[in-house]
Image (spheres, rainbow, N blue to C red):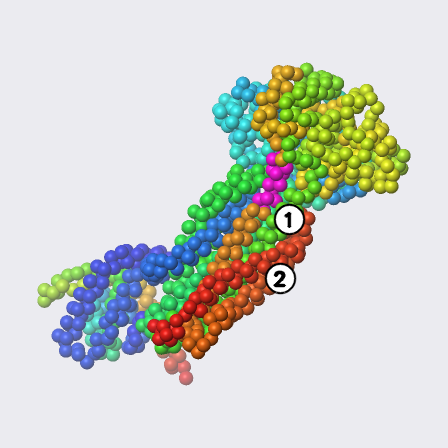
Amino acid sequence: MTMRLRELLARFRDRLHRDHLTAELDEELRYHRALLERDGDTDRTIGNVTYYKEDTRAMWSLGLADDLLHDLRYAARVLRRDRGFTAAVVLTLALGIGANTAVFSIVNAVLLRPLPYRNAERLISVWTGPVGTPSDRNPASLPDLRDWERQAKSVTGIAGYGFNRFDITSSDGDYGARAIQATRTLYDILGATPLLGRLPRADEEGAPVVTISYRLWKEHFGGANDVIGKQIIMTHQPYTIIGVMPAGFHFPSPDIDLWGTLYSIMSMPNAATNPWLTSRSLHGYRVLARLAPGATAQQAEVELGGIQRRIGEEFPEANGMLIHVQSVKDDAVRGVARGLWTVFGAAALILLLACVNAAHLLLERMASRGRELAVRRALGADRGRVARQLATESVLLGLVGGAAGVAFAYIAMRVLLGLAPADIPRLETVSIDLSTLGFAFGASLLAAVLFGVAPALVRSERDVPATLRAQGKGASTGAHGNRARAWLMMLEVAFAVVILVGAGLMLRSFAELTSSPLGIKPDGVVVTQLTVVGARYPTPESKNQAVEQVLANLRTIPGVIVAGASTSMPPSRIQEGQGFTVVGEPQPDPGRIPTAIYIPTTSGFIEALGVGLIRGRAFDTRDNATSAPVVVISRELARRHFANTDPLGHQLLLSNVPRTIIGVVDDAVYEGVGTPIRPVVYVPFAQSPFAGVWIAMRTTAAPARLAAPIRDAFHRVDPELSTRTPVALESMVSDSVVRPRFHAWILSSFGALALVLACVGVYGVIAYAVTQRRAEIGIRIALGAQRGSVVQSVLRRGIVAVVIGLVVGLAAAVAGSRIVAGLLYGIAPTDGPTYAIVTVVLLGAALAAGWLPARRAARVDPLIAMRGD
Amino acid sequence: MASRKQSIVPGTLDLLILKTLTAGPQHGYGVASHIKEWSREVLQIDEGSLYPALQRLRQRGWVEAEWRKTPNNQRARYYTITAAGRKQLGIEEASFAEVFDAIRRVLRSV
């Protein structure tokens, strides 16, 4: 071993002094021959001096490495000489590799990198679901959770958390922030490491402590280290900041800036009876658990299910509930993963398409290089050496393309991040990092192999003398080369069709989604939020009164036509769901109680949103805290429960209060555009007041011009009320479909790219055929062939391959479309119009791409063509 | 690379060169002449085998090369066996003897 190393070092040293050593060897050989002549040893042949000098020189080289260097230099020279070709290949590859690298950087950050928790794969989330609708995934109640915590053996820790929104008072202006409020051991289970300080401990469940996000720390505390121990006023209550989490830490979603305790609930005056702490029917806590060593998620699901069954036997309100366990990682990227993988798949297809295109270009060039290579072979370069030279050129092209691709990816990534929905977790950790560069490098090499292989295969079939004899009239690569070209073109078309179908499906789905009925008229509606909490509003009555006063002020603003408030807001904000029963119908089994979105609503709200009134009336001044309990139901609820009767006058039992149905309104979207419609019950706000409301105003004024009058309207009621910037409901609706818009946008740009690449391929094939058949075409024209029929005959050959590619691509798209089925709204993955449009677009584009060069065939001058070159 | 003439048993060229050099430093032609002479002209080594072999031995650290004046006052490259080269010579001599004995036993066996 040491000997080999020494030899290698010696070789390396010799390599550096090779010129000197060669001179020395020459001198040595001269001396040797001089002595031979002196001794009259002339019967011996001197031998091929060059040959054994080469043998010796080989001793001073580093073998493969030296050859490689030589190949690289040669390849670089060849590629520099053929600028147009090189630019075309590099651009094609840069697009393919760049698109992939950009998408990979996002996929890697969001899906592949491990979550920033200790042993994240052992974390599970626990959900409940009523037996009646077992696919539901609901949170748990606190008393149930406490029982699980005491009894479960398959988990080392189990804890819950709820969401809250706080108004934060600070000297440089108030702001809102989302928080999670955790039971005892949540942060121990999570095992996350703070940037500064710590997270709340198990013994601090009722303590006013909070750990803040990196964003909050930077934006509102100047990123100062002495923030630990400082006070923060959250919704009029002082808390102590005990830690700062690092950038990119999200639990459970990117919009959370505060990680706190149950203090805000436990410090309420009614804590002993607060349903958030005592009710088994209020499922307000999401549950996180860490599996015990050796335990599996299935075991935990079975054990917790058993515990829940025993709880249900004791407490009827907890009866009929199933337990579902999911891995936290799956939970975190649920809904995001499929979309991203689809985009990634499309990007991979683009890369394949780019490779096929590059192979195509390489093949074209191989035709003009046939003679060069044949000469090299004839001069003694063995087949392997020539193949290696070609491989080196491919790899060099791949790497240059990859480098250009990374530059392109950098720009593409910015664009993608600008378009990507902000609710994708960990999006801000996306960067061009080492693993991304590694991916780009791997993709470049893979591409080089893919596009380098085809021409090499064609070439190796050829024999040298034949090529040399052919005197290189456009040096044909023969029938074999033509067949390879047709194959490549077919592949290009097929790939493009698959990508185009994907793009078409996304676009059609997006169009369906945005034209789906919202049940509201968002134009002209301005939305803001109001929170009435703290010592000034101790009772439900005082909260109701403040909300009504603010609304009364708002209604006097010029331009405001009608204003109202409720606890929910289309298209995707709901406060709570509640079980209900129709009075007079038999009591359903536990776990089979129907639920509805429960919305305490003031007068004017339904009118402001433009939700259509179908029967009866909406709320007005008659519905106050002391009037008869009433309810307005949605069309969907009426359809499910009052199919054959007029619902007006019937009663619903909601939270043990029988409420008389006074009206039926249209179905409005509360859980996101395109989601299945659920029943909704509206109850008078005065009869069920709540601290936080959404306010909707139908106006003739722009949201920005309303900011000042709205602040004034709030502050005339209470100068301490915090205000939020009013937004147009239309922008809320459009923001809520940002994810499908992202998919549609990105896949359409990929589709356009694919179409261009495929057309370049078709153009290339036809153009080449025209060049190759010039003499033949010239003869035909000379013999009187119509120019139109010449064009046709040229086109026909190419179109056959296009049509085969189209059919193959359509078949592949049908087979693969199931993958995107989950992303589609309102259309089937085999949506006929999409496939039809793709067929027409592709055929049209291919014909146009083929026609351009084919037209040249018609302009061939027979005299020049037949004279040849 | 040993030789295209097969004039010597493959693999023994290194052995012959190293052995020759134990008599003292020698240039390439001297080595070839010595082997030719002592083998009674049976073993003839051409430059095509000799100089690559010498370079190889040098790279392995078994011989050292140095330009010196010949007795006739000409410049020639002299090769000297090193301590590592002597050790290698011992190994090669032993294995050659072993192989040679083995071949002889086989040739006498029938």
In the image, the segment drawn in magenta is A731-743
Chain at numbered mark 1: A
Q: Amino acid at mark 2?
A: Ala
Q: Amino acid at mark 1?
A: Ser
User: Same subunit under labels 2 and 1?
Assistant: yes
Separation of marks 2 and 1 at Cα, in angstroms: 20 Å
Q: Are marks 2 and 1 in contact (CB under 8 Å)?
A: no
Mark seen at residue A509 = 1
Q: Would residue A435 be counted in the magenta stretch?
A: no
The answer to whether residue A850 shows anywhere in this view is yes
**Where A120 falls versus A370 (above or below)?**
above
Chain at numbered mark 2: A
**Which residue is at 58% across, 61% downward?**
A809
Residue A32 is left or right of residue A723, and the answer is left
Quarter of the image where one finds residue A527: top right
Q: Which callout, 2 or 1, points to the residue nearer the camera?
A: 1
Q: Nearer the viewer, residue A197 or A859?
A: A859
Quarter of the image where one finds residue A396: bottom left
**Where A248 falls versus A780 (above or below)?**
above
Q: Which residue is mark 2?
A: A811
Count neighbours of disc 1 (C-alpha within 10 A) and say few if under 14, some if 14 to 19, many if 20 or more: many
Q: Percent position (x, y) of residue A621?
A: 77, 22
**Which residue is at 36% across, 77% downward?**
A469
The answer to whether residue A179 shows anywhere in this view is no
Q: Percent position (x, y) of residue A666?
A: 75, 37
Q: Would residue A735 be counted in the magenta stretch?
A: yes
Q: Nearer the viewer, residue A733 or B100?
A: A733
**Which residue is at 51% across, 70% downward?**
A792
Q: Element at badge 2?
A: helix
Identify the main secondary structure in magenta.
Answer: helix
